[in-house]
Amino acid sequence: MIPRAIASSALLLALAACGTLPFLPQDLVVDGPSAIVCDGHDAVGTNRSDIYYLDQVDEQRIRSSWTEAGQRNANLGLKRKFQPNDNCRAIPAGRPVKLELRASTSYVAPIIAMFNENWSTSGTLSFTPTAGATYLVKGDLGAHYLAVWLEDNAGGGVVDHKFETGHKAD
């Protein structure tokens, strides 16, 4: 009887490990001048999306498209289409801010992720946003090249620089 109880407990523990821990991102409250940062994504087939997102502002973790996609696509199953969500949020402007940008592969179901490539990269950017400006988080994920960066929506230029790993094929 004891081996059966141990086996049952081990099975429950293993299944619990497949779940996710509660993630409690914070809403960012901005007092004073602000700018907007919007996350982005590239759909790759029906069950995968590469998500480019703002993860932290001044070392405070915030709600992002990554967490929203995880909640939206949880347990959709293998026959459902991935549903990304590009979040936009206000950030402080007119003063230096520290932004953590991330790019990560996300799948519609954890079982798909287990048997496919999972890429991610990140970078921390310090700059002074312009009040009223809109910025876009962009990226590129692949086997030989990983990148994430911030673009000014008005001019399309890269803010500061791209955070890159590897070499992009021409």
Image (cartoon, grey):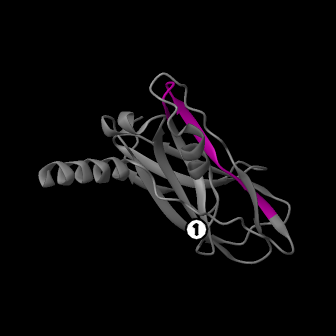
Q: Quick check: 39 left or right of 45?
A: right
- At label 1, counting other C-alpha atoms closer than 10 Å, the crowd grade (few under 14, some 14-19, many 20 or more) is some
Which residue is at the far front? Answer: 1
Camera-side residue of 170 and 86: 86
Camera-side residue of 33 and 65: 65
Quadrant placement of the C terminus: top left
Q: Residue 47 location, x and y as percent?
A: 48, 29
Which three-letter amino acid code belongs to the residue tagged 1?
A: Leu
Q: Is residue 59 above or below residue 49?
A: below
On whether residue 42 falls in the magenta region, the answer is: yes
SS label for mark 1: strand
Residue under circle 1? 125
| Residue extent of the magenta highlight | 35-48
Q: Residue at x 80, y 66 (%)?
A: 130
Q: Residue 25 location, x and y as percent?
A: 61, 63
Q: Residue at x 33, y 35 (%)?
A: 116
Camera-side residue of 161 and 109: 109
Q: Residue 106 location, x and y as percent?
A: 47, 41
Q: Is residue 15 above or below residue 33?
A: above
Q: Residue at x 58, y 68 (%)?
A: 125
Q: Quadrant of residue 51?
A: top right
Q: Quick check: 140 left or right of 144?
A: right
